[in-house]
Amino acid sequence: MKRVVITGAGTINALGQNVPDTLEAMREGRCGISNLEFRDVERLAIRIGGQVKGYEPEDRFNRQQLALYDRFTQFTLIAAREAIAQAGLEFSGDLAARAGVVLGNSGGGMTTLDDNYRTVYEDGKNRVHPFVVPKLMNNAAASHVSMEFNLKGPSFTVSTACASSNHAMAQAFQMVHGGLTPVMITGGSESMLCFGGVKAWEGLRVMSKDACRPFSANRNGMVQGEGAGIFVFEAYDHARARGAEILAEVAGFAMSSDAADIVMPSKQGASRAIKGAMQDARINPEEVGYINAHGTGTAANDKTESAAVADVFGAHADKLMMSSTKSMHGHLIGGTGAVELLACIMALRDGIVAPTIGYQEPDPECALDVVPNEAREADVNVALSNAFAFGGLNAVLALKRAP
Amino acid sequence: MSINDRVIKIIAEQAVLEPSDVALDSTLESLGIDSLGLVESIFAIEEEFDISVPFNANAPDEGDFDISSVASIIKGIEALVKEQS
């Protein structure tokens, strides 16, 4: 089996429009959550989110491209350009034929859907733009990445709500690990911050009106974010042969299904995925220094996740660090695991653990070291990234410091 | 129909019971209504009375809206109807 490493990373999210800016914000514990700005926001009860601000699509794409790129596709391409440029790869010949792109996404082109429903229902028009379908389909982002970079291998989109990116990255890992291809582009993106997108979430009554405070006793719900995280997964021997810089090693993963409830998480399902990822990566629980938590800031998730980690790690649970960066960038749903993987890379490569900001009151049911409010320097050799989705679908990735 | 009867009808429908089986001192839990059922009931109540109920599923016990029993829910709805009409 091939060892798999990460040789490129790219992102755009509420904390920054590239990886260096995002990591700097995480180091400084900056909050990217702000007042939402879009049409009809005044009709919402929830008006905050991790929205990408100061972003002009026209600066990045031409008119023809924008006619085809929903916001989630734009974010994906921006992140993919950064990741692939960092990796320094050009896809041609045999490499192009084998390399593909597997991405996570949950809502598809929600902004496109919202705008066009408005056109036909509210404005009463009987005609919509001809590209509505190719723009809103969930696989649009993966397809445009494949076209821009000439990726002709296995390519598709995985949709498992909040675990989409982790499931996608697990698939990409498996393909490189198994020798199917030396390189895969992977990660995920989401852009649901529009009237219809937030209105739908509002209905569930799990959103916070003021802040995302994971693991803090006074937390009162999740806050949505948007953006993308894209990575180049490459076979270690391939990367080494061409002298590529290695950011971290992807050592293994596990997936599990709760088979229990459509929205409530399960301790058993989460535990099985965490345990499974460590087994797959052949690491001992005592080696894990950092866990990027799913940490949504809801009562249900944070208690269940803390209990699962306490269960799996026993006494070591009190020694490891577990933070939720959703407190800073919000919950990117189908793209969240991808942006959160950056915090794992920062812990492994730079020795800096991103904090859980907005933490105000200890909760006895979440009694772990959640790295409250301030980033911390630490020597981390192994990190895990948790994602537990609505529908009870879980995916955990295990990473190691670059070999 | 009184506010009392209308709320009981909504709760009974959610619990798949006859309205006569919903006692004022029943808790939603005792009627077999789980967290999703609760959120759905509150939506139905908001639609029925055209009001907005301040309820966050992350902190169901906090806030002014008391969901500890059918009677407390009715009392809360009566106050909201008065306030918001």
Image (tube, rainbow, N blue to C red):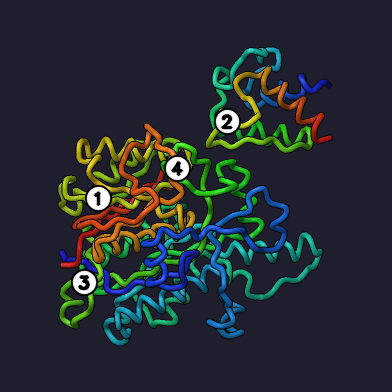
Residue wearing tag 1: A277
Q: Position of residue A172 (x, y in %)?
A: 31, 65
Which quarter of the image is occupied by the C terminus of chain B? top right
**Label annotation for residue A360:** 4
Gap between marks 4 and 3 measured at Cα: 43 Å
Same-chain status of marks 4 and 1: yes
Same-chain status of marks 1 and 3: yes
**Label annotation for residue B62:** 2
Tell me, yes or no, if residue A103 can be seen here: no
Residue type (three-letter) at the residue carrying disc 3:
Ala
Labels 4 & 3 near each other (Cβ < 8 A):
no
Q: State which tag comes first along the sequence, 4 or 1.
A: 1
- Which residue lies at the image location 20% right of the left edge and 36% below the top edge? A315
Residue wearing tag 3: A235
Residue type (three-letter) at the residue carrying disc 1:
Ala
- Which residue lies at the image location 56% right of the left edge and 56% below the top edge? A49
Gap between marks 1 and 2 measured at Cα: 38 Å
Chain of the residue under the numbered disc 3 shown in the image: A
Labels 1 & 2 near each other (Cβ < 8 A):
no
